[in-house]
Image (tube, rainbow, N blue to C red):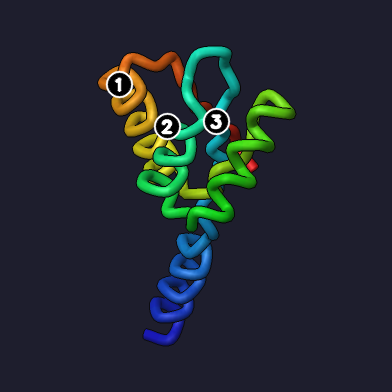
Amino acid sequence: MARVEEEIENRSELELEEPRLYKVMLLNDDYTSMDFVVDILVNVFHQDAQKANATMFKIHEDGSGLCGVYTYEIAETKVAQVHSLAKEHQFPLRATMEEE
């Protein structure tokens, strides 16, 4: 019986790996308004106004900027939300995700 418990314990340890994390990045373009980018950062990525403005300027100056780091499914959802809102408001704003 102790051997079975040991095998279960070992199996549990193997299954409890940390999930991979993914960076969600917004990409700069020449058409999306700065106000819209700030709104996305506040409403999708839950940044406060000050952080959202700093991130928006980083995106504008560097061509891209980090919005957050999430598990795969959450990162994928955030990217889809950005694309959906951008399309709805007729902006070409793009988001990407890359493994951290």
Q: Which three-letter amino acid code belongs to the residue tagged 2? A: Phe
Q: CA distance from mark 3 to mark 1?
A: 16 Å
Query: Marks 3 and 1: CB-CB under 8 Å?
Result: no
Quarter placement of the C terminus:
top right
Q: Vertically, is 31 above or below 48?
A: above
Q: Earlier in the sequence, mark 2 or mark 3?
A: 3
The image's mark for residue 29 is: none
Helix, strand or loop at mark 1: loop
- Report x, y in % for residue 32: 47, 20
Q: Which three-letter amino acid code belongs to the residue tagged 1? A: His
Q: Nearer the viewer, residue 12 or 38?
A: 38
Q: Nearer the viewer, residue 33 or 65?
A: 33
Query: Marks 2 and 3: CB-CB under 8 Å?
Result: no
The image's mark for residue 36 is: 2
- Report x, y in % for residue 24: 53, 38
The residue under label 1 is 89
Give the residue displayed 57% in from the left and 45% down from the top: 53
Badge 2, how many Cα within 10 Å: few under 14, some, many 20+?
some
The residue under label 3 is 26
